[in-house]
Amino acid sequence: MSTSTVWGAAAALLAAALWSVASIIYGRLGLQIPPLLLNLAKGLVAIVLLLVTLAAQSQLGFGLGINPPALSLLALSGLIGIGLGDTAYFHAINNLGARRSLLLDTLAAPLSAVLAMIFLQENLGNLAWLGMFCTLGGVAWVISEGTPDLPGKSPRLGLSWAIVSAVSQAVGSVLSRSAFMLADVNTFGSSLIRITSGLIVIMIWLSRIRGFTMVKTYSYRLWLGLAGAAFLGTYMGIWLQQVSLKLAPTGIAQTLLSTSPLFILPLAAVLGDRISKRAVLGAVISVGGIVLLFTET
């Protein structure tokens, strides 16, 4: 594995770790803030942070220069991967349940690897494919443990939405990778373009909900928690995702980005939850797969 790929893989793992921390915070915030409003608010906070970062770097042109195709690919990546993907994921959770939706979401990694192989000629070795399926198999083993999900509104519809979510994430990743292959894009700039494009879809969706209003009164602690989660999970998390897609092959990056459930295990233990032997075994299998990914040359 080249040095740049190693850095890209490390960025993906760090993004997954930050997403796991943010997910715990969002889980608590979601008890008081509607999910859609929470999703919109965290995106707006991240956009402000990214604009400040780019201004400090004197990179408000996003480092795109005169490459409109790269800009278009990133915007389309955000519309599909974040806007459509997140929207479909919310629908999947409502109709299928959170655990099964997350389980099906692991399909995004092999799908992205196949799409990258077809459209970007990114060919992974046998060891990388083995590492990918070991990693995702371990993650799936961890997620599938526990009490069954409560029955959703429509399991068949939920399954359809979950597949749409996984495909959208895979397509979004490949489009981002394509943009990086066309131009030396600033990763903070690419993050800003993707999040902004994704929020367009979310705002359109919100506008179609009768009676929805953004005028809410929440406590100072709640807004502080939202800002912290948005900084870790959206600002840093999506930036690291873009770094990983810029430096590492799509399949490897997407696989490692899918390991958030593994990082939740030690956090859950710290919070007092019991970690089963099955969860530990799943984590060990995934770590073995990660090692294989890092040893792929």
Image (cartoon, rainbow, N blue to C red):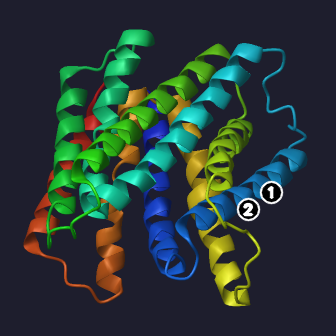
Q: CA distance from mark 1 to mark 2?
A: 5 Å
Q: Is residue 121 visible?
A: no
The residue beneath circle 1 is: 48
Q: Is residue 270 visible?
A: yes
Q: Position of residue 143 (x, y in %)?
A: 22, 60
Q: Residues within 10 Å of mark 1 (few under 14, many from 20)?
A: few
Instruction: Please tell me which residue lies in front, 295 or 206.
Output: 206
The structure residue drawn at horizontal position 55% and vertical position 43%, both measured from the top left corner, is: 82
Q: Position of residue 39 (x, y in %)?
A: 59, 60
Q: Secondary structure at mark 2?
A: helix
Q: Quadrant of residue 233?
A: bottom right
The structure residue drawn at horizontal position 53% and vertical position 66%, both measured from the top left corner, is: 35
Q: Are marks 1 and 2 in contact (CB under 8 Å)?
A: yes
The residue beneath circle 2 is: 45
Q: Secondary structure at mark 1?
A: helix
Give, as a three-letter code, the residue at label 1: Val
The structure residue drawn at horizontal position 32% and vertical position 15%, both measured from the top left corner, is: 123
Give, as a three-letter code, the residue at label 2: Val
Q: Quadrant of residue 45?
A: bottom right
The structure residue drawn at horizontal position 78% and vertical position 24%, both measured from the top left corner, is: 64
